[in-house]
Image (spheres, rainbow, N blue to C red):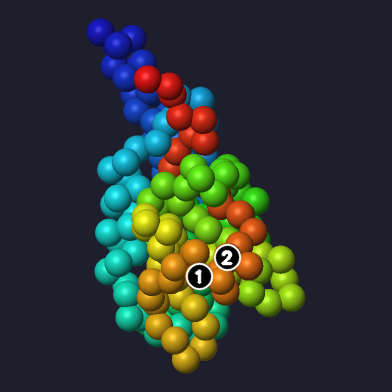
């Protein structure tokens, strides 16, 4: 009986150590993870809650967001920790082809001299939500508009495997 209690205690402590490390970035594309439509939908639902929030350089809260702060905040509200900058977010995620983008995935653009200068959350139907720039608010944008099409540099996912299982 003591061995069972000891084993359960060790397993419980191990479980807590795995789920309670806030410094780890989520690597949900690891073996065994596949696209979870509900998780993508939940991320989009969370992102929509902050439509109209003011842009604030360096902002990462509902008091004001910059683009990467907005993405980081939305993902954190869904239990997924992301790096702070657009560039770091791009390199932390699994790269996916534009045709494989699903709701909740991240889209990256070159809007300034920096290659990875802007990020938004894909919501479906070629649209994404982002925190654009000073003087603007969190809003929708169309990735097929010439401005965004010319500046698109890639997409990443933190919520699905880029090679979905075949049925």
Residue 59: percent from left, percent from top: 49, 78
- Residue plotted at (44% across, 68% down): 142
Residue 40: percent from left, percent from top: 35, 48
> Disc 2 to disc 1, how far (Cα)?
6 Å
Quadrant where the image shows the N terminus: top left
Can residue 9 be seen in this snapshot?
yes
Residue 149 is labelled as 2
Location of residue 84 with respect to 112 vertically, above or below? above
| Nearer to the camera, 32 or 154 | 154
Location of residue 104 with respect to 137 vertically, above or below? above
Residue 117: percent from left, percent from top: 64, 70
Label 2 with label 1: CB-CB less than 8 Å: yes
- Residue plotted at (36% across, 16% down): 7
Structural crowding at the residue carrying mark 1, measured as other residues with C-alpha within 10 Å and reported as few (<14), some (14–19) or many (≥20): few
Q: Residue at the right extreme?
A: 113
| Nearer to the camera, 106 or 79 | 106
- Residue plotted at (32% across, 41% down): 37
Judge from the rendering whether residue 125 lies leftward or rightward of residue 101; answer left or right.
Answer: left
Give the quarter of the image for residue 148. Answer: bottom right
Residue 48 is labelled as none
Residue designated by label 1: 145
- Residue plotted at (30% across, 50% down): 41
């Amino acid at each position: 009986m003591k061995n069972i209690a000891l084993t359960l205690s060790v397993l419980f402590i191990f479980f807590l150590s795995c789920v309670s490390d806030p410094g780890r970035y989520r690597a949900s594309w690891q073996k065994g993870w596949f696209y979870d439509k509900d998780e993508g939908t939940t991320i989009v639902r969370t992102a929509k809650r902050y439509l109209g929030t003011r842009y604030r350089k360096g902002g990462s809260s509902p008091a004001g967001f910059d683009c990467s702060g907005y993405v980081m905040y939305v993902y954190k509200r869904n239990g997924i920790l992301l790096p702070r900058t657009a560039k770091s977010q791009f390199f932390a995620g699994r790269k996916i082809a534009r045709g494989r983008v699903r709701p909740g995935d991240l889209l990256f653009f070159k809007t300034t001299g920096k290659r990875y200068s802007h990020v938004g959350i894909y919501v479906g139907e070629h649209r994404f939500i982002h925190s654009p720039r000073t003087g603007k608010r969190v809003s929708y944008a169309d990735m097929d508009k010439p401005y965004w099409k010319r500046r698109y540099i890639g997409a990443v996912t933190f919520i699905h495997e880029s090679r979905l299982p075949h049925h």
